[in-house]
Image (cartoon, rainbow, N blue to C red):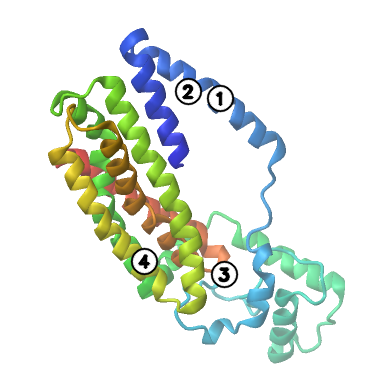
């Protein structure tokens, strides 16, 4: 993401002043269409949650603490609940099939039903289709479960205020440096690319550092995110108030990279945290809410 933003800003900043504002849109659209075709032709979506079967197998959904749990079945009068299955699974050792076996044995109305492979497959398929149906009440229940989890709520509400600076930086920083600080358009673009370079490095720091700290204490990644976000404010303040066309180039580059480095780690840490507290069948909706709050904050930046 950081590299893509940097390339887009570079194309607009270097080509726009010479060839006009239309050409950057054409230049960017060509690789975008090519990448879309390659992804469509080669990438396959795995069944939701298939990579987390071992985790779901080892957990008791009714007793899991701090995880946003979502009921699987869509009909209120179902006798069979597939809390740990997200798709039809053929393996007899799958968590969904074992859960189904327990429900059959505990249900008085299903005591005489033979636990054959054909029966399991038909029931799993029926419930999978129900789960994937366009049942708006299921989405409401999912949203309620997500918003009942404190970590999810905190991850969401930090997004809007946390992304206000990004809206301002992406929209106004280039123009501010060129119009108010005396930079040429090309020099302002180069400065913004240095910020994007620092941002890319910060993503690595957030991902690798957050994972390392998580293995020590699961509270430490959030501490890393907060410290880097606060520390990143100081070089950005210096860039906005003290750097101009007379500032030595190496100081401008260093300050800008450090500012981007401090601003980036919060993103991957928050996303990893949200992934840790949501199960696969609810994760798409959780990240939709997350992006909604983030984009709301980015929209508020230019407004302010």
How much space separates mark 1 and mark 2, taking CA atoms? 6 Å
Is disc 1 placed on a helix, strand or loop? helix
Compared with 259, 5 (above or below) is above
Quarter of the picture containing the C terminus is top left
Q: Where is residue 131 in the image (x, y as percent from the top left)?
A: 60, 62
> Residue, x 45% and y 65% (percent of image)?
274
Q: Which mark is residue 75?
A: 3
Q: Which of marks 2 and 3 is nearer the N terminus?
A: 2
Q: Do the residues labelled 1 and 2 touch (CB within 8 Å)?
A: yes
Q: What residue is pinned by disc 2?
A: 28
Q: Which of marks 1 and 3 is nearer the N terminus?
A: 1
Compared with 177, 50 (above or below) is below
Q: Do the residues labelled 2 and 3 touch (CB within 8 Å)?
A: no
Compared with 127, 63 (above or below) is below
Judge by depth and name the residue closer to the eye, 51 or 211: 211
Which quadrant of the view contains residue 8?
top left
Q: Is residue 70 left or right of residue 293?
A: right
Q: Is residue 174 left or right of residue 266?
A: left
- The answer to whether residue 136 is seen in the rendering is no
How much space separates mark 4 and mark 2, taking CA atoms? 35 Å
Q: Position of residue 6 (x, y in %)?
A: 41, 34
How much space separates mark 2 and mark 3, taking CA atoms? 47 Å
């Amino acid at each position: 993401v950081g590299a893509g933003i940097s390339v887009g800003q570079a194309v607009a900043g270097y080509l726009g002043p010479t060839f006009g504002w239309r050409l950057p849109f054409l230049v960017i659209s060509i690789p975008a269409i090519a990448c879309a075709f390659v992804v469509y032709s080669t990438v396959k979506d795995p069944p939701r949650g298939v990579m987390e079967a071992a985790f779901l197998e080892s957990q008791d959904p009714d007793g899991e603490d701090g995880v946003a749990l979502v009921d699987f079945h869509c009909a209120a009068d179902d006798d069979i609940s597939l809390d740990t299955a997200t798709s039809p699974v053929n393996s007899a050792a799958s968590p969904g099939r074992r859960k189904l076996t327990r429900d059959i044995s505990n249900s008085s109305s299903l005591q005489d039903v033979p636990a054959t492979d054909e029966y399991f497959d038909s029931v799993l398929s029926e419930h999978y289709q129900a789960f994937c149906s366009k049942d708006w009440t299921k989405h409401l229940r999912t949203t309620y479960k997500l918003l009942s989890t404190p970590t999810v709520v905190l991850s969401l509400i930090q997004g809007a205020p946390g992304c206000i600076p990004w809206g301002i930086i992406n929209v106004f920083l280039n123009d501010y440096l060129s119009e108010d600080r005396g930079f040429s358009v090309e020099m302002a673009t180069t400065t913004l690319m240095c910020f994007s370079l620092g941002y890319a490095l910060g993503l690595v720091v957030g991902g690798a550092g957050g994972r390392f700290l998580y293995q020590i204490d699961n509270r430490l990644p959030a501490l890393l995110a907060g410290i880097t976000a606060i520390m990143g404010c100081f070089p950005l303040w210096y860039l906005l108030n003290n750097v101009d066309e007379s500032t030595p180039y190496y100081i401008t580059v260093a300050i800008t990279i450090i500012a981007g480095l401090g601003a980036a780690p919060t993103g991957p840490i928050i996303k990893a945290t949200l992934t840790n507290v949501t199960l696969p069948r609810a994760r798409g909706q959780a990240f939709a809410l997350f992006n909604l709050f983030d984009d709301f904050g980015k929209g508020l930046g230019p407004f302010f």
